[in-house]
Image (spheres, rainbow, N blue to C red):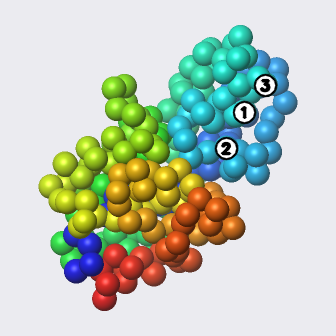
Amino acid sequence: MKYKAVIWDMDGTVLDTLGDLHDSVNYTLSTAGYAPRTFEQTRCSVGNGLRNLVALSVPDGEKNPRFEELFATMKEYYMAHSRIKTRPYEGIGEVLDALKRKGIKMAIVSNKLDGAVKELVKDFYPQMDYSLGEIEGIARKPAPDMVNKAIEALGVSKEETVFIGDSEVDVLTARNAELECISVLWGFRKKEELLPHGASTFAEKPSELISLVTGE
């Protein structure tokens, strides 16, 4: 077996969450009378947590005098509307089942709020052995802290673990955690957006992940 464990990113990797995130951004902006963002603008802004998404979406970012209020609105609205349009990517469930049958341990690590991560894992991917979202006291990706905690929880070594994600944040996270990385191309970033950040191993469709992880 090439790897004994997989740590997955969530948004853009195993779940298409962009619709709900986009709707939540535009609801938040509407409460302050700001113009809505386009779907493409939201796509380019996700991947580094809700706070960063709000900072990239409101005028003047965190310097906006209403930023904390808008961030609180975004958190509350998204937690209540995180499963409206969100759906699994086709084929991911079958990949997880296949890896599970081979005894591979799996975790999800996401910059999404921890409560939302755990609710979505429960709803869509109970195959996961562990999940962790953003919580106070643990540095978010691309810092390695969340990944290191997942590795400890799975009881594996870094040499036995691969990180799978869709964004430049995931490439950098894997590098910081000293893990090999597989970048998927059905998520929120295109190959040409990932190459400048050092991505080198790619999966164009979920079924390719089985051989990339197992070496078979």
| Mark 2: secondary structure | helix
Q: How many marks?
A: 3
**Which residue lies at the image location 70% right of the left edge and 17% below the top edge?**
63
Of the residues shown, which amino acid type is indicated by label 2? Ser
| Mark 1: secondary structure | helix
* On screen, residue 212 above or below 105: below
What residue is shown with label 2? 45
Residues at circles 3 and 2 in contact by the CB criterion of under 8 Å: no
Front position in the image: 188 or 74: 188
**Which residue lies at the image location 39% right of the left edge and 34% below the top edge?**
139
Specify whether residue 205 is in view: yes
Of the residues shown, which amino acid type is indicated by label 3? Pro
| Mark 3: secondary structure | loop
Give neighbour class at mark 1: few <14, some 14-19, many 20+ (Cα, 10 Å). Answer: many
Of the residues shown, which amino acid type is indicated by label 1? Ser
What residue is shown with label 3? 59
Give neighbour class at mark 3: few <14, some 14-19, many 20+ (Cα, 10 Å). Answer: some
- Among the 4 quarters of the image, the one containing residue 195: bottom right
CA–CA distance between discs 1 and 2?
8 Å
Q: Position of residue 18 (x, y in %)?
A: 62, 50
What residue is shown with label 1? 57
Residues at circles 1 and 2 in contact by the CB criterion of under 8 Å: yes
N-terminal label among 1 and 2: 2
N-terminal label among 3 and 2: 2
Q: Position of residue 85 (x, y in %)?
A: 59, 50
**Which residue lies at the image location 71% right of the left edge and 25% below the top edge?**
61
CA–CA distance between discs 3 and 2?
14 Å
- Among the 4 quarters of the image, the one containing residue 71: top right
Which numbered circle lies on residue 17? none
